[in-house]
Image (spheres, rainbow, N blue to C red):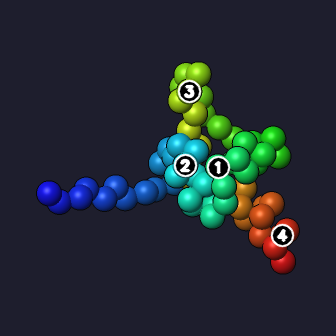
Amino acid sequence: MSEIKETLNDDSLLNRKEAAAFCKCSEREISRYVDRGLKKIVFGPRNVRYRLRDLKKFIARHLKTAMA
């Protein structure tokens, strides 16, 4: 079986686990990032997604300055 690799663009929607892997943090921290201004897209009670473009902007604004 060949694995299908999805190419990500800025409009890709990531779930919490994928967003945590992208940010190199734990899944619990993603909910803290939402409190700090990260936008989320809600499709249902257990179906929350995060847009890759918003993750990149959040990392550039908040996390890079904290690490520097």
Q: Are marks 3 and 1 in contact (CB under 8 Å)?
A: no
Real-space CA distance between mark 1 and mark 2, rounded to the nearest whole angstrom: 6 Å
Q: Rate crowding at label 1 as few (under 14), some (14 to 19) or many (20 or more) other CA atoms within 10 Å.
A: some
Q: Are marks 4 and 3 in contact (CB under 8 Å)?
A: no
The residue that mark 2 highlights is 17
The residue that mark 3 highlights is 46
* x, y percent for residue 6: 34, 55
Front residue (pair 53, 48): 48
Q: Residue furthest bottom?
A: 68
Q: Are marks 4 and 2 in contact (CB under 8 Å)?
A: no
Q: Is residue 40 above or below residue 45?
A: below
Element on which disc 2 rests: helix
Q: Nearer the viewer, mark 4 or mark 2?
A: 2
Q: Rate crowding at label 2 as few (under 14), some (14 to 19) or many (20 or more) other CA atoms within 10 Å.
A: some
Give the residue drawn at x 51%, y 46%: 14
Of the residues under marks 4 and 2, which one precedes in the sequence?
2
Of the numbered discs in the image, which one, if any, rests on residue 65?
A: 4
The residue that mark 1 highlights is 27
Look at label 2 and name its amino acid: Lys
* x, y percent for residue 26: 66, 55
Which quadrant is the C terminus positioned in?
bottom right
Give the side of residue 7 with respect to residue 59, left or right.
left
Element on which disc 3 rests: loop
In this orientation, does residue 38 appear?
A: no
Which quadrant is the N terminus positioned in?
bottom left
Give the residue drawn at x 77%, y 64%: 63
Real-space CA distance between mark 4 and mark 2, rounded to the nearest whole angstrom: 24 Å
Q: Rate crowding at label 3 as few (under 14), some (14 to 19) or many (20 or more) other CA atoms within 10 Å.
A: few
